[in-house]
Every structure is written in C-alpha cells, then in structure tokens.
Amino acid sequence: MKVMVLGSGGREHAICHGLSLSPEVDKLYCSPGNPGIAQIAECVALPSGDNEAVADFAVKNQIDLLVVGPEQPLCDGVADVVRAKGIPVFGPSKAGARLEGSKDFSKQFMVKYDIPTARYATFSEPEKALEYVAAEYAAGRGVVVKADGLAAGKGVIVATCQQEAEDAVRSCFSGTFGAAGSLVVIEELLEGEEASILALTDGNTIVPLVSSQDHKRLLDKDMGPNTGGMGAYSPAPVVTDELMTEISETVLARFLKGIQSEGLEYRGIIYAGIMVTKNGPKVLEFNVRFGDPETEALLPRLKSSLFDVLSKTAQKKLDQAQMVWGEQPSVCIVMASAGYPGTLQKGYPITGIEAAEAEGVIVFHAGTAVKDGVLVNNGGRVLVVTAEGPTVADATAKAYAGVKKIHWEGVQYRSDIAYRAINRK
Ligand code: AMP
Ligand code: GLY
C-alpha cells in the first residue's frame, strides 16, 4: 500500500513511524516532512495550502491513503478535494473541521448536543465583551478569553484577573490574532485536572484511543507561559474506567450523534480536551486532528497496525478495525529551543541522538533542519523523546536518560513530566 502523510512536526513523525511499522505499507510519502521523517519516508515539498497539488500528487502516485496531520489543511478542505478523486482520506471534511476552526461553532455544537462544557458567550464587539467580563468578575467568577478562529495555539488567554481579561479582549479585537479574533468567545474559568481523550470516528462508529495527558506550561510545576505542549504521558490515571465510561456517554456518543444529525462528513480523529471538574468532565475544546505531543506518547503504545485502523476509518469500516494496545505506560519529553514559546534561537548543531536511541527511546523530530550536512534546531519544539516502561516512573526515567544524551546550545525541557501520574502511585 502507498500512503501519504501531510505535515512536518513530531506528531507527523510519530504517525509516519507507526505507518512504517505497519506490514501493509510498502511506500510512504510525507509532505513536507522533516529530517527525522526523511529516514523512513520519501519527503516531497508540495506547495503549502495547495489542495489541488496534493490531489494531483495522490492521483499520479496511486496513493491508497492520505493522512492529514495538522488542522490548517483540514480547515482549508484538503480532505474534500482529495476524497473527490476517489482516494481514501483520514481527516474530516472542511465542514467537520470547523469544530476546531471556529470556537463559536464548536460551542454551539456542544450546547445543541448536550455535551458538557463551560458556560460561554460570543461577541463581535469589544464594548459588549468588556461589559460581560465586568459582570462576570462582579459576580465573583473568572473567565477565559478565546479568539474564535485558528491562532496557532495562541488564541486562548486564561485570565488571572479582570485587567488581564480586558486586555485579552482588546488584544483580540485589535487584530493580534488576525481574522481569528474578530469574534471572541468568553468562557467560564473551569478548575480541575486536564486530560486528552482522542477517538477515531468514521461517522458510524466512534472508538476511543487510550487516554493521555499533556503539559501545556513551559516550566516545571506548571509555571510559565502556555506552549503547544512540553510533554505527555499515557495513560492518564485521572481517567479512571468509570470516568472513561462517563466521557464515552456524555461526550463521544453525543459527538457522534451531533455529526450525524448535522450531516458533517467526518472520518478521522476527534480530540476532546477535557477538564475533570468536581461537577464531572467538561470539554474545553475539540480538535479535529491528533494532539501534539500526545500522539508521540500514544502511538508507540499501539502494537497492531496503524495503517489498518487509519485506512478502515477512512473507508467507513471502523467497526471492522482492531486495536491492540501495549500494557506499559509511555512518556514523551519535548526538547525545545531557547526562547520558546517566544523568539527562537535557531541553527545550533544537535548532538547525541544515536546515543539517546541506544538507551531504548524513540526520538521524534519536530523542528529540525539539515544545514551544510549538520542537523540543527529549527523550530520551537525541536525533538520529542518517548519511552515505555513497566511503570510510569520507569518510562519517565528512561525517557530522561535519553534526553540527557542530546544537546544543542540553549536546549530547554521540563524536568517534571508525568509528575502527577508518578505522585498518584
Ligand atoms: P484550548 O486551546 O481551548 O484547549 O485552550 C488551551 C488551554 O487553555 C487548555 O488546555 C486549558 O489549559 C486552558 N483552558 C481553556 N479553556 C478553559 C476554561 N474554560 N477554563 C480553564 N482553562 C481553560
Ligand atoms: N497538545 C495540545 C494540542 O495538540 O492541541
């Protein structure tokens, strides 16, 4: 089988890794890919944002399955264009991708289908939004301010005081997030522990993957600015069997009913960011793609063919797919450039990846480049190091043993990934 993956991050490296281990796959392409992916796939540089170019390539190269990694091409409708050529695509339609592409649409969907989520209101004018913020604080409640559209993970401001909430509202409307901020969603601030629940759906069936938990803050003890994610582990002990049953009923089953009732073409992943509050699980957001870095922790635990399950999802035969998960927990640590998540210091040679691999870890590339034959850091999140182990503490120790072998100037990473899971034991 010939498979093509779109994307260039650690998530796409983990997807390519899983596909390269799938016995059905004999040719793997990735556009644009990265130097790590290039070791297991043929990287091609199709013009970014050009759906027709992807469709032409897929037709010419007789691709049997297209797997779309990031949200942007999904929101741009790549799945619709390629599927129209008769090629199976793992990834929702443009209409389905609005569940991530518009927070207002997503919240309306959750309310309509009774999916538990934070109370909210949507505004198109700053004055009304500021009045709402003032009223919430007057009633003793905190808020979270969200730009409606895609903002590369930066459009969510968890305000720590009224002033910060007001600044966030003004900043959204003044164009900090471009068109994404012309509508602003203001939500009730929820408290609890977060978990990521990813599920496969083909529109007929919905099947959860094993649970995971991300670490959004840059620094140890969950301090510092929000990032794309600094590490993850799977399973997330906060997601007990009982809680998973509740999430399956109140989130996943209702999600499936919702996409069916709305006629949304959806064959891919639905990622529910969940806050486990004292009033039960609530959805913080839907993403229409695999999480990053959750995927780098999750997929190595899948011991059956990744191709089989992705391709059956794309062909609306998910009910025939079987997933076999390893018992061992896994942990992944993100290694980032100096300056991340702000102005990055890039271009420093990276050493020690082979020595790390000798420790038994998998090293996924996220933001690397080859310059004059030398591997250098070229993005915010640069490498993601994954290990499995008999316990989450073992997996964490093994992952850090790998991390410690790798170096470049200014490298930063958290030293406490998985602390919640370890302390719980
Ligand atoms: P989102 O992109 O919507 O997942 O938001 C990014 C992060 O902001 C989440 O992972 C949470 O940590 C936080 N967040 C989002 N919405 C809320 C909320 N209503 N209450 C508390 N924290 C939130
Ligand atoms: N890890 C957070 C995300 O993928 O959105």
Image (spheres, helix red, strand yellow):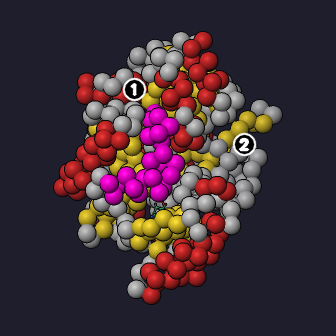
Tell me if residue 243 is in the magenta stretch. Answer: no
**Circle number at residue 376:** 2
Q: Is mark 2 on a helix, strand or loop?
A: strand
Q: Residue at 31% of width from left, 38% of height from top?
A: 260
Residue 128 visible, this angle: yes
> In the image, what residue occupies the spot 36% across and 28% down?
313
Residue at x 32% of width, y 54% of height:
112
Q: How far apart are marks 1 and 2 (CA)?
A: 36 Å
Labels 1, 2: front one:
1
- The answer to which of 253 and 210 lies nearer the viewer is 253
Q: Which amino acid does label 1 sit on?
A: Ala
Instruction: Give x and y (percent) for residue 279.
Output: 25, 69
Q: Nearer the viewer, residue 288 or 220?
A: 288
Residue wearing tag 1: 314
Confirm whether residue 324 shows in the render.
Answer: no
Q: Does residue 93 belong to the magenta stretch?
A: yes
**Label 1 or label 2, whichever comes before in sequence order:** 1
